[in-house]
Structures are given as structure tokens and as C-alpha cells.
Amino acid sequence: VNVVDPWPPVPAGSLFGLSNLPFGVFSHPAVAGGARRVGVAVGDRVLDVAPVLGDPVFSFPTLDGFLAKGRPMWRETRARLRELLTDAHYRGAVAPHLVARSEVTLHRPFTVGDYVDFYCSLDHAANVGRMFRPDAEPLLPNWRHLPVGYHGRAGTVVLSGTPIVRPCGQRRPPGADGPTFGPSVRLDIEAEVGFVIGVGSQLGEPVPIEDFADHVFGVVLVNDWSARDIQAWEYQPLGPFLGKSFATSISPWVVPLEALEAARRDGPGQDPPPLPYLQRAEPWGLDLALEIAINGAVVSRPPFVTQYWTPDQMLAHLTINGASTRPGDLYASGTVSGPEPGQRGCLLELTWNGTEPLTLDGGSTRTFLEDGDTVTISATAPSADGGRLSLGEVTGTIHPARRC
Amino acid sequence: VNVVDPWPPVPAGSLFGLSNLPFGVFSHPAVAGGARRVGVAVGDRVLDVAPVLGDPVFSFPTLDGFLAKGRPMWRETRARLRELLTDAHYRGAVAPHLVARSEVTLHRPFTVGDYVDFYCSLDHAANVGRMFRPDAEPLLPNWRHLPVGYHGRAGTVVLSGTPIVRPCGQRRPPGADGPTFGPSVRLDIEAEVGFVIGVGSQLGEPVPIEDFADHVFGVVLVNDWSARDIQAWEYQPLGPFLGKSFATSISPWVVPLEALEAARRDGPGQDPPPLPYLQRAEPWGLDLALEIAINGAVVSRPPFVTQYWTPDQMLAHLTINGASTRPGDLYASGTVSGPEPGQRGCLLELTWNGTEPLTLDGGSTRTFLEDGDTVTISATAPSADGGRLSLGEVTGTIHPARRC
């Protein structure tokens, strides 16, 4: 017997209230024979969407089909789900399709088409500049004119919880002429916010900045794991490659943009004013409060709202050359760092290139990650009901290198 | 009536003889109701593979399923096709499934998973270094230690023949402080060879260099269109992005590695010797003779055999950090340039950064591409029958910029 109480099925103080309703993919032995299905998180439960809405797109093993449906369908679906979960009239029909979140297995929610990583935090870019080019301007000449970005490896975007095996590779020890080979000794995190494209665009057709919300379905949290020593040796002149491509973790619940209406803010002022195709038409700064914990100790609280380039600008830039997009394309903000030391989004900055170790709970210290460390990035945002909502979390544990 | 003569159906001197048999995807109004199907090019014809081999994987609209089958099946399929196309006993059964190549529509042969572009030509890298860093060593310190590479945009890999719309974007005019916006005025080509992964690999499991041919199915020609002005402004510090992502063209016929046995050569000597994971186990240098034509005039003949890093080294490097691969992943060599001026693989080098214009047929000159220009890259290689085989061609015509 599936006892659902209270109704609506949201305990007081839940960050997964009726204003959130993020989408994911789950399986449960008692649902559809254990097959992967589209689910919506509500309170401490997951709603099996297919039987209550009767649309076969929700029986798919990914969100891919739903993502491609477009904004009117996304809105209608959310509105109908809220109605079904609120009106006592539907309680008897809906309750049998709610399962405990603690009992489900979550899966990668969508097929990642292309993965692009930006570099949108002025504080992050400036800190990196100060560390590695101490005698020059912290920001490179292009930085304030365009959201710098590059393509990452889509095939190694993994679900939160996937073990992260320490990568092997070439790195050049300080002062050495040539490289040595072995496990990365400067394994880092990058706390980021990712944007999931629902409706793609055609080759040769830029997406105007004002069309952002017609294309982007929602938001996930991203940990763009980085091997700083591998990256430092390889990245000239074509950018990061193996220092990043071993794994990028994403959170399981995709929070629709529509759930973030109350979190929308004007983006920060921009000087110089960007070129016309990058000029903001609507406020798409987002007041997301991130938190980074290592082995349970909070080490940073990066604010997304201070990011210089906003996600509508990122999409307009990504497509201005006519590059097409597809449902499931993912683009991430780059490391989210705020202006304060306790708001930095990676260990490189938090330990100032390893020179200022962090102290964790229990007194142990870290410059970069050690085997066995678990990193969890979470975030919350203001919600339409006046409270807050959760974007869930992305977590991963470092496993020792193999085959080095 | 389908009159097939001669038998085997290969005219004298054909570069698509029984030692070639490349795979592609075609449609023809008279075959399977015009659906996309797997085809093999033979002589001037395309063989509809599904009915003659009876395996449903050849009725797929892409090569994806066949690619994933693995090397024993790839070999067995080729051997059986040669038998069917040679033995007069099968003529009656096979001939009805041959259609004229001139009558088919070709389609993108496989779903591109991740696209990686390398930078494997020493002559290309050194020429670029001499142009842009005239007072420094032409090669950066890492270049001889690893095949430098980066991820490109998989979603904009298009079939040969797709129109190439001149991209718009930011570029900084010489001497200016900031960028202007408009159509690229330095639109270039990069003649490359691409390697198509058939059998993927698991996350955390590097592909040993000796396993190259168990994973890579075959070869396509690649034109990695490049907007040099956009690229120059954007690429610091994370590498090329919009200067490349507007389009990458590939040839329609995937030539199996097995067809290139007679083209295998030792790779060039490498100094310093590479790290153990990059040390070659077998000769995978390939004697491919490329040719670049602009509006029908041959402007360069780049040799692939002189490339410093060989494709087995590229795959070993791509996966040494544990990055997984998937069927349909594509990695390209980077611009193929030989040591002679007439062997350079891009206009940047052929015109020495625009300072030495090329003269085409009819006396017109080019530094970079003009609207209406058609670029065709083709290649041949020695074949097992003592003659030569064709890798087909990749072509594209520049269309004027839109929406700038």
C-alpha cells in the first residue's frame, strides 16, 4: 500500500516543492518492470510521469523526447503536474505513481549532444590571470568582449555519483625540460552551472539572444573535474584536452528555467558594452547559491548571480557563427567564483595554486584532491512560493589511478 | 533491366575496385522505397548491402550498428562481399542490387559521437609557429612529446557537398584595440584525414597503442573549415571555438583500415622518443596522397605519410586519461602539410598568412576563400591489387554570410 501523506506530497520545508518539479530519469523495481522512465521529484518522492499524463514520451529512457517538444509543451506539462499534485480530486489516481526518492536509481537524464564549457566568471578568470601571469593584466584582451568557451568531451559527461578515477597523463614537473608520466597530482574540481538545450537550431541560423528561453529547457549542476598538471602541459595552443576529458559530472535533476523565474536578476553591468548580438534583452542573471563540500566540510559558497556573462549571452555567442544546436546539448558556465575568497569555485583558487592549503573537518589539509575524497556541489535558489528550491547535487569520489 | 557489365562490376582503372569497397549510406528511389541504407561503392556503382548479406544491420539508415560490430565482423563482411562480387556464380543474385553511383543520394554515413581534431603535422605546426611567433622556436615545448589535440563540435560535422555559409563573428582588425563584428574575411580550409571509431572503450580504460585496429574502423577525408580572423581573436586561452564550429565537412565513403594494408608505412622517426604509451607497436603511417583543388585548380598535394604523429598514437593519447570512446567518434589528423611549399594543407600556409596570393586557373588570385569558391579535397592510396584506390572526396562551396 502506497500511503502518501501529506497531500500535496510535500513535507514542510522541502526544497522540492510544487514550485520546483525538476525532471530526471529513474528506475524502480516496482515501476514498469524496472525500466528507465521520466520522473519528477516532488517532496521526498519521485512521480512516474508516464501513467499520470498518458504521453508515451515519458516512457522513454531519457528526457530527449520531452526536451525536443518545446516551451509550450514544457509549460503545459508543469501546469498539469502541479494541478494533479495539488487538487485532492486527483489524489487517488496520482498517489500510486509516487515512489520514495530513497528507493529509486537515478540515471543520466539526457543524451549529451555537444558539451561546451565557458569561462564566464570575471573573478575566476582574473584570479587565474593573477596566478599565472602575475606581471600582466589579469584578464586577456578578448575576455570582456565575448564569453570565452571551448568544446569538451560529451561522451564522458557522467551522472553524479559515478566514481572518478584519477587520470594518468603527461605533466612537466616545475623546472624540468620535459614531461614525466603518471597519475595527476593536481586533481581539481570546477563548480559550474550547466544549461540543457531542449529545442535545437538550424545550421547557419544564429539564436537571437531574446530567444534563449525558447531553446534552453533547464539547469543542472556540473563538476568539471580538472587535472591541472596535465592541463598546464598540454593546453598550448589549442586549449584543454586530456586535463578535462576524463570525466564531467552532472546532477540528476534538470530544473526547468520556468522554476527559476523568482531567481532571475539583471546580469552585472558590462564595460565595455557588448556588441549588439550579445546585448541582453531580458534579465537572465540567476540568483543560484552554490555550496562546495569536501568530505562533508563546506569549503566554499560561490554565488552564480555575480557571473559576468549570463546564459542568454552564452547561447547567442555559441551560435552567432551559424553553429547548429541539438536537443541535449549542454553548455556550462565555467568555474563559478564570486569576489570573496570563500566564494571561489575550484581548489586552484581556494588554495591559491596550492600555496594556501584548506583545512577540512578533523584538521586534515588539502591543496588538491586525494584518493577517497568525496566532493559534493549543491545549490538552492529563491522559488515562486517565497521559499527556496534545490537544484539537487552533483557528487563524486576520487578512486586511485589505474594502469599508469 | 539492370545490365551489369563487366563482371566483376569494375571498369578498368577504377579507383573503386575490389580492394577498396568503402562503406557509406545512400538512398535511391528504386531501393527500399528511397530509405537510407548501407551501401558499398564498387566501380561506378553502389551495392545495396542488406539484401545480399541478409543482415538487418545493413538496413539501418547509418553505419552505426555495423561500426559497433567489431573487427572480425568487418573482415568477414569484406571477404564475403569480394566473393559475391567476383564469383560469376553469384552474378544473377547480386546484379539486381547494384545501382549507378551517379543516381544515388549520399548521406552522412554515421552519427558523430565526439569529434577531436589533432595537430599532427610537424611542417604545419612549424609553419604556423614561424608565422605567428617569428622570434621564437617554431614548435612549442610540448609538441614533440604528445599529439596536441582539442575537441571540436560534433553536431556541425556535415556531409561533403553541404553548402558552407560564411560565418559571422568578432574579429580584431590589425592594430585595433577592440573587435568589430561581421563576416569572416579570412575563411580557410584545412585538409585532414579522419579516423572513425567502430568499437568504443570503457571509461577509465586507456586503449593500448597496439589495439588501434580493433577500435578504428576506417578513414574519411575531412575539411576543417576555419575562420582565421575569428579564431585569432577568440582562442586565448582555451583554444579554437567559433572559428571552427560553424562546419566541418567529411567525405561520404568510409574506407576500411583493412583496405589500406598496402598503404601502411613506418611512421617518421621521432626525436625525442615518445613516452612508452605512445611508442608504436606496428607501422600505422599511411601513404595517402591528398590533393586540394579550388574551383577545379589543384593548389596543393599534401602527403599524409610525413605526418609526425600516426593515428595509433593519436588514439592511445586520446584515451590515456581514461576517457571513453563510442562508435562513431571521429578524430582527425589536423592540417596535413608536407615539407614542400606545394604540399601545404591550408591557405594560411599556402599564401603565407595572406602575403603570397595563389593564382588559380583563369588568372584570378586568392589569399583566403571568396563567396562562390568550391574546394575539393581528394586522396588516393596504394591498393592491395598493385594499383591505387580512392578515398573519394570532400567538397564544399562557400555561400555568402547571412544575418550579420
Image: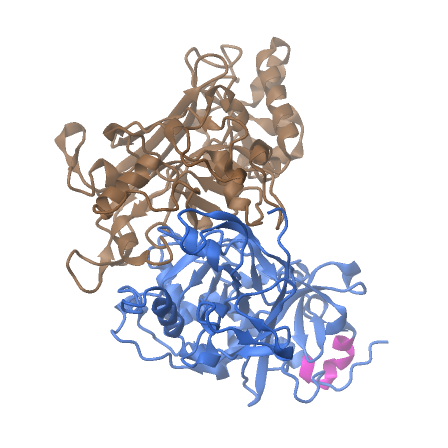
Chain colours: A blue, B brown
Helix, strand or loop for the magenta stretch, by majority:
helix
Residue A286 seen: no
Left or right side of B226 for B365: left
Q: Is residue A153 left or right of residue A89?
A: left
Residue stretch in magenta: A85-95
B191 relative to B14, above or below: below
Q: Is residue A279 left or right of residue A183?
A: left
The answer to whether B41 is drawn above or below residue B210 in the figure is above
Quadrant of the snapshot with the C terminus of chain B: bottom left
Q: Nearer the viewer, residue A28 or B205?
A: B205
Q: Which residue appears farthest toward the front when viewing the image?
A: A175
Q: Is B84 colored magenta in this rendering?
A: no
Question: Looking at the rendering, which quadrant does residue B354 occupy?
Answer: top left
Towards the viewer: A339 or B28: A339
The x, y position of residue A253, in whole percent, is 61, 70
Q: Is residue B157 above or below residue B69?
A: below
The image quadrant of residue A98 is bottom right
Q: Residue at x 48, y 32 (%)?
A: B219
